[in-house]
Amino acid sequence: MPEKAKNPEAARGFTAQERAAMKERARELKAEARASRSRAEGEHDVLEAIAKMKGQDRAKAKRLHAIVAAVAPALVPKTWYGMPAYAKDGKVICFFQSGAKFKSRYARSVSSRTRTSMTATFGLPLMP
């Protein structure tokens, strides 16, 4: 007979935070499916996601957005699980994760393909 889970949250399956992230991703996929998303729509979504951030995370996300726009204009801005992201050929290349999103001490910028820091990828600091 299987043991009962000690954590009631684990017994129910996904946490509220995980469910919210999945719902956000489902909304993003539906929006992409309805129409081929233009660069302007993606830019609007990214800037909206950045505006929801607080303090240092917002400043870093704005700086990353400016760096990506200047260094890699071929990347299309979009949101990915509610986070600002940049894609090429429909695949997310890099994204910015706010520290507050997962109650982490620090924000992260990650390159999806190589799992390296964006600072290492572009060789530029996020904060001047």
Image: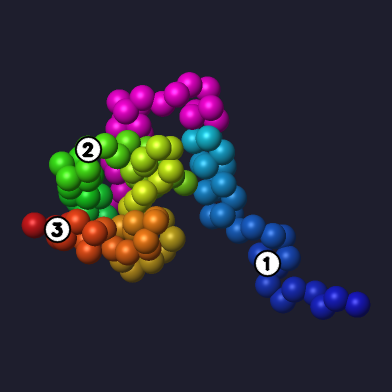
Disc on res. 124: 3
Check disc 3 and give the amino acid type.
Answer: Leu
- Label 3 sits on a secondary structure element that is loop
The x and y percentages for residue 14 are 64, 58
Q: Mark 1 Cα within 10 Å, few/some/many (few <14, many 20+)?
A: few
Question: Is the magenta region chiefly helix, strand or loop?
Answer: helix
Disc on res. 39: none
Q: Marks 3 and 2, Cα distance to the nearest angstrom?
A: 16 Å
Q: Marks 2 and 1, Cα distance to the nearest angstrom?
A: 43 Å
The x and y percentages for residue 97 are 36, 55
Q: Report which quarter residue 8 is drawn in.
A: bottom right
Closer to the N terminus: mark 3 or mark 2? 2
Q: Is 48 within the magenta?
A: yes
For the point 17% across and 45% down, the residue is: 71
* Pointer 2 residue: 73
Looking at the rendering, the stretch of residues picked out in magenta corresponds to 30-54
**Outermost residue toward the right?**
1
* Pointer 1 residue: 10
Q: Mark 3 Cα within 10 Å, few/some/many (few <14, many 20+)?
A: few
Q: Report which quarter residue 114 is drawn in.
A: bottom left
Closer to the N terminus: mark 2 or mark 1? 1
